[in-house]
Amino acid sequence: MNARAAGPVTRTLPAEGVGAERYGPAPVENPALGEVFAHTPGCTPQQFDAVLDDALRAHPGWAATPLDTRREHLLACHRALLAAVEPMADLLTREQGKPLRHARAEVRLAADWFAHTARLDLSPQRLVDEPAVRVALERVPHGVVAAIAPSNYPVLLAVCKIAPALLAGNTVVLKPSPDTPLSSLMMGDTLREVLPAGTFAVVGGGTESGARLTVHPAVRLVSFTGSVDTGRAIARQAAAGLKRIVLELGGNDPAVVLPGADVDAVAGDLFTRAMTNSGQFCAAVKRVYAHRTQYHRLAAAMADLASAAVVGDGLDPATEYGPLVSRAQRDRVAGMVDEAVRSGARVLAGGLVPDRPGHFYPPTVVTDLPSGTRLEDEEQFGPVVPVVPYDDPQEAIDRADASPYGLGCSLWGDEDRARALADRPRCGTVWINTHGVLRHDVPFGGHRDSGIGVEYGPWGLHEYTQLKVRHIALRQADREMS
């Protein structure tokens, strides 16, 4: 792909009416090759302000647009993304690394998310209906929403913010990850054809651009998915302007395999749900706790699966797991495994950076992990899973909860026993005999360091609204007529 001739990369910014000046073209790597294959345009401070001004000017008209008309625009976005699946998925694989079939699935799911969101209800709610008083509760938009998306699912997780924000009557400015901007820029071009001017725009850049977006006076809500440290920084920056925030900050999800569970039956599911997107998934299994009597057998079964996994370029149809999105992330994961080994842990499969181009790290299973290692206490966000023994299920839950994260947890084994334990983990979702299953009609969010607010369904839609009460004191004549 020619770096600067790629149409979707260079057309999206500057936005319509902003001008043609370029600012700081940024390289984009193909993580399977470790080579730059495209450049994205930067955004000057003047262009940046112009995009936000456009969004601010467009907001009153968009907020006044009838809800059913906004629904139709979301359905048009659904159709537009479906028509762009192939070129967008190709860009997504080249910039992010995931297998092409998974990239196609992500774009299709993002398209469907527009359709799911379009069906959600925002009707006013009658609170009081008395002879002298009528009180209704409405949900109204905030204004301009800043959506800051991550690199693991850059299209889908952006749309999970864009769709509800638009339906609620907000205008949206999206800043994608600098590691994976191309698919978002193409999405900007695609959706701009079916949305009114100013309602949606994409701006590029890295941390500095995100900070500028967060503190910009036009922005009233910041929706961010990413690391805890960046989430804290956004919260501090947004607090100065009393902006609302929605923060999905990842997790370090444990899976607790209960005594007597069928190890052969659960090993495959645990491995698959740990390695989803090469481990780059906030709700992936990050740690497995198994009863001491079954611990070695489970670890060995997962290690066999890791050794047999096919790792390669996402454009190769045989590839099951692609590279990590960047060299920095690959090196972080490798460093955590190396530290664990130096502390006495044992690697059953994987554990070595392969001698090949690209940012690859093999599926890795680690045992004999001493307490206090980063591999257990922090989110590795890579294809590594430690298997840790326990003697009592409450011990496993307590050890898992020692982490500051609280996104999800799963319990595997006898359903009745799992149900009895399900209220103990301190997290947003407890799965039983599955893990990381997310649905458009089920809220998703974390406790503690895993975030603020929720996404998906009506609960996620409501995050993009604020309450407005309409209180009417009826006159005598009105009361007689009613």
Image (cartoon, rainbow, N blue to C red):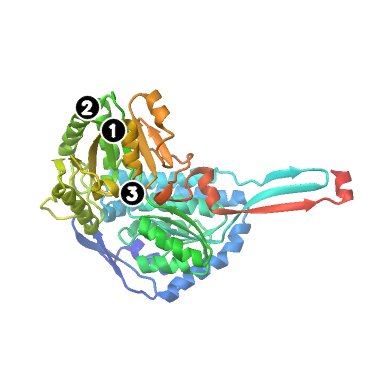
Task: Give the secondary structure at mark 2.
Answer: loop
Numbered circle sitting on residue 470: none
Left or right: where 212 falls relative to 323: right
Please name which of the two marks, 3 or 1, marks the residue nearer to the observer.
Answer: 1
- State the quadrant of the C terminus: top right
Numbered circle sitting on residue 269: 1
Which amino acid lies under the numbered mark 2 shown in the image of this protein? Answer: Thr
Q: Which residue is mark 2?
A: 293
Q: Characterize the local packing of mark 1: few (<14), some (14-19) or many (20 or more) Cα atoms within 10 angstroms.
A: some
Cα gap from disc 1 to disc 2, whole angstroms: 20 Å
Q: Earlier in the sequence, mark 1 or mark 2?
A: 1
Q: Residue at x 65, y 50 (%)?
A: 138
Left or right: where 410 falls relative to 471: left
Q: Characterize the local packing of mark 2: few (<14), some (14-19) or many (20 or more) Cα atoms within 10 angstroms.
A: few
Q: Residue at x 29, y 68 (%)?
A: 26
Q: Which residue is mark 3?
A: 86
Q: Characterize the local packing of mark 3: few (<14), some (14-19) or many (20 or more) Cα atoms within 10 angstroms.
A: some
Which amino acid lies under the numbered mark 3 shown in the image of this protein? Answer: Glu
Task: Give the secondary structure at mark 3.
Answer: helix
